[in-house]
């Protein structure tokens, strides 16, 4: 036990580990806040779709050799989120069909572009890192950390400012419209913020595991608590604890960061499920 503590203390002295913990906690917090809304509005699958689109955008950014991928990936993902929201209201192409087409298409085209144009000597390693976030959180630059911190704080401020309206739109959109709430505007806000969270979270868990970061804390907290505010608070606590535990465990046992965080979330979900059953009895 003392050896593990000494190893942690040794690694925590490095700036890249400190950067990873700061960004990881902020991303986990943002994901949990809007994750509850996405689960209740049955928008969970949009996380998967946007993450695959972000993968395609990253492939293009890598080929263009951009110094900061987020400059290109963030706008592309946000625009796609807005288009998906508009397309979901189209009777010809349903929202889930549009997400499926875009996600699969982006994954396929992104990998094809990387194979044709990439000059990297370790293509499979680069793709694995992007998809599963194996080491990307530990290689963040100072500028990327600053951008992640600014965007995360902006997301949290937006959630706090529009909490009541987001709550109204989440539970009864028609009633919200009847009371004067501009539901379309807040649906757009949710879509844009989700896109931002997806791009930020790709560094933490990779594009294939982002949905777990959004969905599992929300579902775990719903097993135990029955009111919206309580679910949001508990979801945030679970998400942050799992993120910190996952990152520290990956340092100690040399496991992939993203997969370890997801495994921690799965364990917490089953514990919450059992606890919920016992509490109801």
Image (cartoon, grey):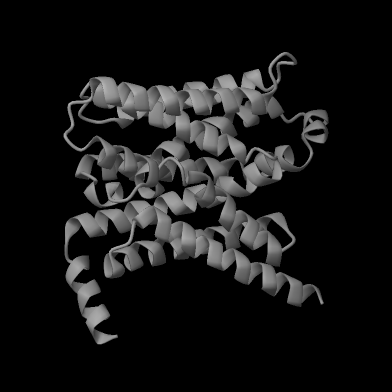
Please state, as top left, top right, bottom left or bottom right, where the N terminus lies in the image.
Answer: bottom left
Quick check: can you spot residue 72?
no
Quarter of the view holding residue 119: top left
User: Compared to 210, does 16 lie above or below?
Assistant: below
Q: Is residue 127 left or right of residue 142?
A: right
User: Compared to 271, does 176 lie above or below?
Assistant: above
Q: Nearer the viewer, residue 75 or 58?
A: 58
Position of residue 9 measured from the top left corner of the image (x, y, whole percent): 21, 74
Q: Nearer the viewer, residue 109 or 46?
A: 109
Q: In this view, does 199 lie to the left or right of 124?
A: right
Numbered label tally: 0
Position of residue 45 measured from the top left corner of the image (x, y, whole percent): 60, 38
Residue at the outermost top position: 92
Position of residue 222 measured from the top left corner of the image (x, y, whole percent): 68, 59
Please state, as top left, top right, bottom left or bottom right, where the C terminus lies in the image.
Answer: bottom right
- Point 67% across, 23% down: residue: 88
Q: Is residue 184 left or right of residue 12?
A: right
- Point 26% across, 54% down: residue: 19
Quarter of the view holding residue 16: bottom left
Quick check: can you spot residue 196?
yes
User: Compared to 12, does 82 lie above or below?
Assistant: above
- Point 24% across, 31% down: residue: 68
Q: Which of 106 and 153 is in front in this view?
A: 106
- Point 73% across, 59% down: residue: 227
């Amino acid at each position: 036990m003392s050896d593990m503590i000494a190893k942690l203390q040794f690694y925590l002295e490095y700036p890249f580990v400190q950067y990873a913990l700061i960004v990881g906690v902020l991303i986990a917090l943002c994901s949990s806040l809007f994750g509850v809304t996405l689960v209740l509005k049955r928008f969970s699958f949009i996380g998967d779709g946007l993450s695959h689109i972000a993968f395609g955008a990253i492939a293009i950014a890598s080929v263009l050799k951009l110094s900061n991928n987020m400059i290109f990936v963030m706008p592309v993902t946000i625009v796609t989120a807005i288009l998906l929201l508009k397309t979901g209201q189209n009777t010809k192409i349903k929202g889930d069909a549009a997400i499926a087409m875009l996600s699969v298409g982006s994954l396929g085209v992104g990998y094809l572009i990387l194979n044709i144009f990439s000059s990297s000597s370790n293509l499979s390693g680069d793709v694995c890192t992007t998809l599963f976030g194996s080491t990307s959180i530990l290689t963040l630059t100072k500028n990327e950390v600053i951008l992640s911190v600014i965007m995360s704080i902006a997301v949290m401020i937006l959630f706090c400012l529009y909490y009541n309206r987001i709550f109204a739109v989440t539970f009864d959109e028609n009633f919200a419209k009847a009371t004067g709430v501009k539901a379309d505007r807040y649906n757009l806000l949710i879509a844009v913020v989700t896109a931002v969270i997806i791009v930020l979270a790709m560094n933490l868990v990779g594009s294939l595991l982002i949905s777990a970061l959004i969905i599992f804390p929300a579902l775990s907290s719903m097993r135990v608590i029955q009111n919206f505010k309580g679910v949001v608070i508990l979801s945030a606590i679970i998400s942050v604890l799992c993120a910190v535990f996952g990152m520290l465990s990956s340092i100690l046992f040399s496991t992939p960061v993203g997969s370890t965080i997801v495994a921690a979330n799965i364990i917490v979900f089953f514990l919450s499920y059992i606890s919920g059953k016992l509490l109801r009895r």
